[in-house]
Image (cartoon, rainbow, N blue to C red):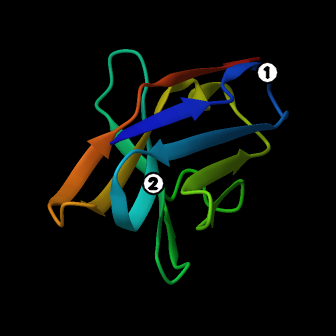
Amino acid sequence: VQLQASGGGLVQAGGSLRLSCVASGSIFVINSMGWYRQGSGKERELVASIDNDGRANYADSVKGRFTISRDYALNTVYLQMSSLKPEDTAVYYCNADMWTAARVRAPNIWGQGTLVTVSS
């Protein structure tokens, strides 16, 4: 099982980016998916998460600017980021809590990071 993230890049403040993360492999069901970020010299923090019922949870710092969504058929999670600020600059990681096809719980699968840089 693996997560593949994409969509990072360089954007000016006030701009938008959309991140995508696809889960692949022997998956039975994905319980929840989310995005974390880690800025330079900072700890990794939760940005947003979404469960199987579509309930989303956001960090206060991104509420009203970021939107998380899922395509359940494609095992994909998206993060639409708008009104980006320089302080949003970070490596963004996707994360999933799932059951594998072997019925093994995998509560903390990480994708590789994708760098988002917001210039002022």
Specify whether 77 is left or right of 18: left
Dividing the picture into quarters, in which one does residue 3 lie? top left
Looking at the image, residue 14 lies above or below residue 86: below
Q: Residue at x 50, y 33 (%)?
A: 4
Q: CA distance from mark 2 to mark 1?
A: 22 Å
Dividing the picture into quarters, in which one does residue 9 lie? top right
Residue situated in front as seen by the camera: 26 or 20? 26
* Picture coordinates of residue 70, whole percent (x, y): 61, 63
Quadrant of the frame with the C terminus: top right
Q: Residues within 10 Å of mark 2 (few under 14, many from 20)?
A: many
**Badge 2 or badge 1: first in the primary sequence:** 1
Q: Which mark is residue 44?
A: none
Residue situated in front as seen by the camera: 23 or 32? 23
* Picture coordinates of residue 76, whole percent (x, y): 58, 53
* Picture coordinates of residue 95, whole percent (x, y): 38, 47
Specify whether 119 is left or right of 96: right
The mark lying in front, picked from 2 and 1, is 2
Q: Secondary structure at mark 1?
A: strand
Kind of residue sitting beneath label 2: Gly
Q: Which residue is mark 2?
A: 34
Q: Residue at x 54, y 23 (%)?
A: 114
Q: Which mark is residue 11?
A: 1
Q: Which residue ends up furthest to the bottom in the rendered image?
A: 53
Kind of residue sitting beneath label 1: Val
Quadrant of the frame with the N terminus: top left
Looking at the image, residue 58 lies above or below residue 84: below
